[in-house]
Amino acid sequence: MLKPDELTLEEMASLIRRRVLTSVSLVDFYLQRIEERNPQINAIILQEQRESLYQQAEAADAQARKGQFSGPLHGIPITIKDVCHVKGFRMSRGVEQWRNEPSTVDATAVARLRQAGAIILGITNVPELCMAFETENLLYGRTLNPHDSSRTAGGSSGGEAAAIAAGLSPAGLASDACGSVRIPAHFNGICGLKLTQGRVPLSGQYPNERSGLFHMTSAFGVMGRYVDDLRVLGKLISGADQKDPDTVDVPFAPGKPLQDLRIAVSGRSSVAQVTPAIQSVLDAVARRLNNVVSAVEDARPPLLEEACDVLWRVFITGGDGGKGWEALFAAIGKDQFTKATAQLLEMSRGVELSTEELKRDWVMIDTFRHQLARFFNDYDLFISPVYGDVAFAHGESLEDRGRYAFVFPFSLSGSPAAVIKCGNDPQNGMPIGIQIVAPHWQEEQLLRVAAYLESEFEGWQPAFVKAG
């Protein structure tokens, strides 16, 4: 009997083309999983009508019988993070005041996945405003980590990551402005890819087409069980759409063979503590790579801590003493918040930059990006922890911003970055991922190394522990 959990997206598509597997059977499998497991973890918050899903699947199977196929995702069900327009769904970004009428159009990235044949199972949960590293809001509640319900699934793509980790969905669309794909991928033991800033159109973001400062660090990303899933989805959503002026067409370059690569690996940070379990996994990754690449060296890009501080001051708090957040909440009539949002607002009130300080930080952004590009003249990739520990307990999202020092800098730079699971903490069994960062436009290089490591380590395994 075929087991969907063991199939990559490409394998699913191949079996559908050969009529060994049907879209109806896939939809049926995932609907049963959602019914059994979603009530326990609250990952999928909006679900397409069952009748509609079966109709779409039956239509896909009818096409397949005629030898007609929509694209590489023909008849495959996926999920979408509550962060962009998805036709027919009432999107909210975790804010009740933003939950309006159903979207009448798809965001560009969603439309491309549909055009490739994907069937949208449903929408996954996010934090309020997508502004926390744990997934909880007053509209839909909290998403639990399927490995341990006392721990967070991360954020802001926590619902998407938890759904995939628990086997409710094979893959999906997410987004990353400050680590929102990478942190949840690590916390839930799945694969995640943030593509180069400017490769994927942000057209159709919800609720606003342009998101101000965050448009400069935002990138759509993809999440899945296997590295090959990231490659398939990443290519499908890429390319200019003549709507987002910041998106360009850049081909996916094949990169160098593994044996020619020079890779920097480091878990050092002056602001983030790394547990022995995380360091042990990172060391194991370095040892395995040392067998197949030209060189593995203990090195890290300059100015990582400075970049982390700038992202916090300018993009997350807004640098205006909280006035921007207060104005937004007043405009939409929101006066009740989750703990994380309340903390963010209070922290923002304590950060107010002068004009000179803002200029200083803007210069630092340019300096960091330039220094990182120079670093990648010497190294083809940089590998680091995603986070200094495994998933934390609920309610700890903003206790220490230094804990995000491994992900913040590469949002500021717009670099492509992938996360794959390479181990587990021996004390608690929680998954441990590593982050692979590449120069701009080098996703293929990055994914080639990720695929090698996936073959060397256990990788994704379905996870589901009932909430206590």
Image (cartoon, rainbow, N blue to C red):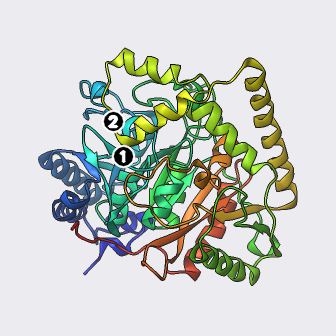
Q: In which quadrant of the rendered image does the N terminus lie?
A: bottom left
Q: Which residue is mark 1?
A: 80
Q: Residue at x 64, y 59 (%)?
A: 272
Tally of numbered tags: 2
From the top left corner, tell me how far across and down residue 127 is, in percent: 38, 42
Percent x, y of residue 43: 29, 53
Q: Are marks 2 and 1 in contact (CB under 8 Å)?
A: yes
Q: Which residue has dot 2 on it?
A: 86
Q: Amino acid at mark 1?
A: Ile
- As displayed, is residue 279 above or below residue 232? below
Q: In what element is the residue under mark 1?
A: strand
> At numbered mark 2, what does the secondary structure look like: helix, strand or loop?
loop
Q: Residue at x 25, y 37 (%)?
A: 139
Quarter of the figure with residue 147: bottom left
- Residues packed near mark 2 inside 10 Å, few (<14), some (14 to 19) or many (20 plus): many
Q: From the viewer's perspective, is 304 left or right of 127?
A: right
| Left or right: 295, with 58 as reference point | right
Of the pair 236 and 100, the residue shown nearer to us: 100
Residue 188 as seen in the image, left or right of residue 60: right
For residue 170, say whether it is visible.
no
Residue at the image point whose x is 79% and y is 42% from the top: 368
How far from the left and from the top, in percent, is residue 315?
A: 60, 32
Q: In the picture shown, does residue 98 fall above or below 57?
A: above
Q: Earlier in the sequence, mark 2 or mark 1?
A: 1
